[in-house]
Amino acid sequence: MKHLLWICLLAIGLPAFAQYPRILVLAERGEQHQPYVDTARIWLDRLAATEHFSIDYVENTASFTQESLAKYALVFQLNYPPYGWPETAKQAFKDYMESGRGGWIGVHHATLLGDFNGHTVWPWFQEFMGGIRFTSYIPTFVAAEVVVEDATHPVMKGVPARFSVVKEEWYTYDRSPRPNVRVLAAVDESTYQPASDRKMGDHPVVWTNEQIKGKNLYIFMGHDPNLFENASYKVLLTNALRWILRP
């Protein structure tokens, strides 16, 4: 009788487990972002157990095809830059997002848009990110306050109206993405500690491009692993995953 009960329980549980959404994490390896990426992976693995999703990790885009991406509800660009992708991978990702077959979250290095390491800027991805081009950053790192601009969006649920980031290398771009995206939060450059003259004026740091069919969210903050000690940051990331993975 007990044996039969276990068989029934397994039969009930297996389909539910099989339906867990899958996410593909494209993780940058090496260099200055390695500590953040390593900490993010630990955090994501723990979250997957409680939020009921599964994760595959890759370290380059060589495997990106329409067929391979179709397996995933979300591509998480974990500090991986938007250059050096094979043309087949670019087209597969573009189709994935424009068709709405899945969603995307990108952090930090995902907006390193420009000509780097012999690669020219990817025009489609540049448009996807609001038409921006990377110009500079604050190499000495500064603390600052992030101001929520759109508290009505689901990813901002439970995020304080203002929250502090204690260490970041805030990128600057040739223009604000605001005319082309829905801005959810911006950094208050007047709160830089120590002060820095590398400013944009209008400086969005969290946004979504609603012109793209697939749900998407960019979060600039993502350089230092201490972000995973920041309760507001963790709420933001958790909300982002829930927003994309849940209907």
Image (spheres, rainbow, N blue to C red):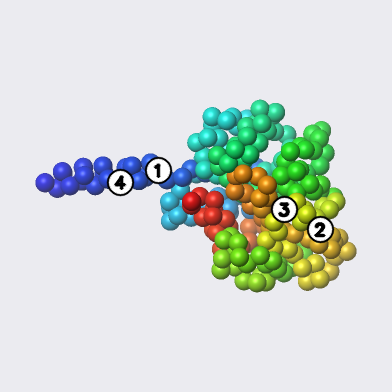
Where does label 2 land, which residue?
138
Quarter occupied by residue 165: bottom right
Percent of width and height locating residue 53? 46, 48
Q: Earlier in the sequence, mark 2 or mark 4?
A: 4
Relative to residue 148, is residue 194 drawn left or right? Answer: right
Q: Verify CB contact (< 8 Å) between mark 1 and mark 2.
A: no
Residue 29 appears at what percent x and percent y? 65, 42
Distance, label 4 to label 3, CA atoms, is: 41 Å
Report the amino acid beneath label 3: Val
Asked which secondary structure carries label 3, the reply is: loop
- Earlier sequence position, callout 1 versus callout 2: 1
Q: Residue tagged by mark 3?
A: 181
| C-alpha separation, residue under disc 4 versus residue under disc 1 | 10 Å
Residue at x-position 45% and y-position 54%: 51
Pointer 2 and pointer 3: residues touching (CB < 8 Å)? Answer: no
User: What residue would you read off at disc 1?
Assistant: 19
Q: Which element carries disc 2, helix, strand or loop?
A: loop
Q: Earlier in the sequence, mark 4 or mark 3?
A: 4
Side of 128 relative to 11 (left or right)? right
What amino acid type should be assigned to the residue bearing mark 1? Gln
